[in-house]
Amino acid sequence: MDNEALNRLIAARRADAGRIHTEIVIACERAACRSRRKRNQPSDWNKSAWRRYILAAAQTPPPFHASLRKIYDQINALEHLAQDPSTDPRQSHSIAQARP
């Protein structure tokens, strides 16, 4: 697999991680605002809202952590493949197929 294809895979994995991070932030903001439809900006939150946000972040479900860990491991492996031209290109195919 050439570097361009590896870079596309790396970008796709980073996008996957970004989506998971966004889901976590949205869930924490909902908790901070007590699930109200209209959410205040974090700059307008009081101390209690920030506590709820932090508590929700601390209680993020383990599947999020496992998914992020797997994605970042894949990104590291793909970056290693992109930097080492002597690596067998078939390794990148197995990483690409392991996408969550």
Image (cartoon, rainbow, N blue to C red):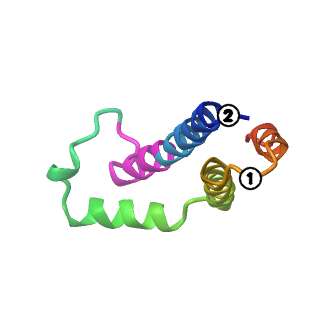
- Residue 22, percent from left and from top: 46, 43
Tell which of 68 and 29 is nearer to you: 68
Say whether residue 77 is left or right of residue 51.
right
Mark 2 vs mark 1, foreground winner is 1
- Residue 4, percent from left and from top: 59, 31
Identity, as a three-letter code, of the amino acid under mark 2: Asp
- Residue 8, percent from left and from top: 59, 32
Identity, as a three-letter code, of the amino acid under mark 1: Ser
Image quarter hosting the C terminus = top right
Say whether residue 84 is left or right of residue 15.
right
Kindly identify which numbered label has been placed on residue 2.
2
Magenta residues, start to end: 22-36
- Ranked by sequence position, the earlier of labels 2 and 1 is 2
The residue that appears at 75% across and 39% down in the rendered structure is: 96
Residue 60 drawn above or below residue 93: below
Please name the residue that numbered disc 1 is placed on: 86
